[in-house]
Amino acid sequence: MLILGRRRIWNNRAGPSDPATMNITNEIISAYIDNLYVNENTDLAELRVFAETHNIPVIRRDTEKLLKVIMKLKQPARVLEIGTAVGYSSCVFADCCGCSVLSIELDEESAKAARSNIENLGFTGQVKVVCGEAGAVLRGLDPAAPYDLLFIDAAKSHYREFWDLAMPYMRRESIVICDNVLLKGMTASDECVTRRRDWTSTRRMREFIEYISNLDYADTTVVPIGDGLSISIIEKNESIT
């Protein structure tokens, strides 16, 4: 949205009344970036097409491209993921740099589907899916075996909880990436919140972004890619190993 004096000009044809179809960036730019997307792994490409065709949520194409660049720069050996869904992003991580991935998924059916996809794609040796409540699983991890990268893409109202519980398992210079933090623009503007049921998740996401943006042990930026990514690097802090 551009604000010129008292006039508001929405850059998306859907406008503020339709957050379900709203892009957080100009739709022409989004389409252009999507057209640049290439997945050289044909099996992963087929899984993406299947998921998109059947309205199964997976990371967006522009989000995937950015994640791959970050992965190749960071070269993490161990990745922790909260929110497996059908296992697509886990396989992207494993395929990108050969890392091991521990992925946590609450829903049993999703975890089952993810394990099947991971096996079919040949990543069983790299990706482990644990089905359970994220808090309980995180509390059971070994702090002596920290992770190089954390990817959070689960219940949006609980991002703060996931972050705090995962921190003991991060090392200095670990990267933390959270997906969908702009919530179709709702995080940025009340005018994008058109359903009463979205107010709680919106408020909590705003609080979460404010929280991670002001931590003394992390440097954070929010990027308008996909539905918004927060990218944080864990800096020197006595509480971080």
Image: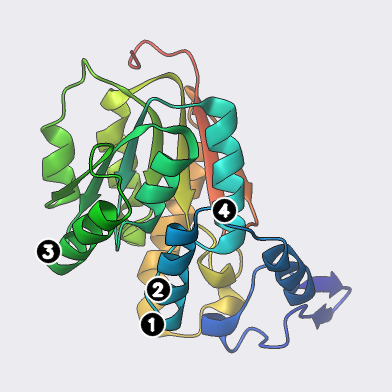
Q: Earlier in the sequence, mark 2 or mark 3?
A: 2
How crowded pointer 3 is (Cα within 10 Å; few <14, some 14-19, many 20+) is rated as: few
Q: Residues within 10 Å of mark 2 (few under 14, many from 20)?
A: some
Which image quadrant is residue 154 in?
bottom left
SS at mark 4? loop
Q: Which residue is mark 4?
A: 40
Q: Element at badge 3?
A: helix
Residue 230 percent across, percent down from the top left: 53, 46
The reply to whether discs 4 and 2 touch (Cβ–Cβ < 8 Å) is no
Report the residue at 16% width, 23% height from top.
142
**Quarter of the image where one finds residue 155:** bottom left
| Dot in front, 4 or 3 | 4
Q: Is residue 56 above or below residue 234?
A: below
**Structural distance between the alpha carbons of marks 2 and 1:** 5 Å
Inspect the image, locate mark 2, and give the three-letter code of the amino acid beneath it. Answer: Ala
45 up-or-down from 192: above or below = above
Q: Are marks 1 and 3 in contact (CB under 8 Å)?
A: no
Residue where numbered disc 3 is placed: 108
Does any portion of residue 227 appear in the rendered image? Answer: no
Q: Residue 54 got which mark? A: 1
The residue positioned 33% from the left and 16% from the top of the image is: 239
Q: Which residue is mark 2?
A: 51
- Residue 71 appears in view: yes
Work out whether mark 4 precedes mark 3 in sequence or the reverse, and give the earlier one: 4
The label nearer to you, 2 versus 3, is: 2
Relative placement, left or right, of 68 versus 160 is right
Amino acid type, label 4: Glu
Q: Residue 153: x, y in percent?
A: 38, 54
Residue at mark 4 to residue at mark 3: CA–CA distance:
30 Å
Amino acid beneath label 1: His
> Who's the residue at 78% across and 75% down the image?
28
